[in-house]
Image (cartoon, helix red, strand yellow):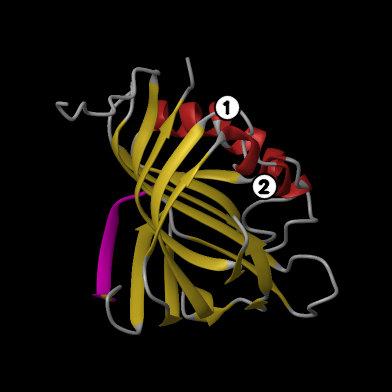
Amino acid sequence: MPIKPNVRTGAIDWTGENPGMLLKTDPDGDWSVLMLYFRVVWSPVGPGNILLLYENPAKAAGMPDCCNVIMADNEALRDYIKEGFIEKLGTFGGAPAYAAASQLTIDKVVSAGDPCGDFYSETVTGGGLEVKLVWQELGKPTALELPPELTGTGDRIMYSLLVDSKSAYVEVNGRRLAGKPVSRQQAGLPLSTAFLYYSETWIFPE
């Protein structure tokens, strides 16, 4: 019997990379820092980079009061990801910082380190900010295929390569933001709230 390929025919939402961090100063307290970075290689509105960073997720304020920002080098992609993705993630879209965050332009992104090793970083520059994102104590890669009910949006399928990170931090213009990753469970796996997601593809089921 010939082998048939498994071709997904649902609409592609976007594909690329989506590393992030959710940090706390107290493991039993609220989030002190929330961050998602998107390097999108394909979407209906083109490719681009987006950084969502809340220095104070509970505060409805942006720059210069605090570094609650949404940075992008493709405004159409920024709006597409905000409306169709971030607003479906309660932790990020429901935070007081979301509506108040300053919207800035990304001028440059520089990657460093090796996700196959023990250190990786992205440095995002623009709007007078240099934001350095650092992941350390990296784990072995895990391939994931998550149905809609196990994803943050609840309405699409996700394929991804996950690299867990036990130690991570954010620096803004050389100032380290407060907080550390904490433990979490995803897809039955014991993980951290700091992570590198590669080859991440979101597909709407038919």
Q: Left of 78 or right of it: where is 47?
A: left
The three-letter amino acid code for the residue at tag 1 is Glu
Q: Which mark is residue 83?
A: 1
Relative vertical location of residue 145 with respect to residue 22 in this rendering, above or below: above
From the top left corner, tell me how far across and down residue 173 is, in percent: 46, 74
From the top left corner, tell me how far across and down residue 132 is, in percent: 42, 71
Q: CA distance from mark 1 to mark 2?
A: 12 Å
Relative vertical location of residue 145 with respect to residue 65 in this rendering, above or below: above
For this orientation, the residue located farthest to the right is 28
Which image quarter: residue 194? bottom right
Relative vertical location of residue 133 with respect to residue 201 in this rendering, above or below: below
Task: Count all numbered tags in the image, as a single digit.
Answer: 2
The three-letter amino acid code for the residue at tag 2 is Phe
**108 part of magenta stretch:** yes
**154 part of magenta stretch:** no
Q: Secondary structure at mark 2?
A: helix
From the top left corner, tell me how far across and down residue 175 is, in percent: 54, 80
Residue highlighted by disc 2: 92
For this orientation, the residue located farthest to the front is 1
From the top left corner, tell me how far across and down residue 85 is, in percent: 55, 33
Instruction: Find the magenta span and give its range.
Output: 104-113
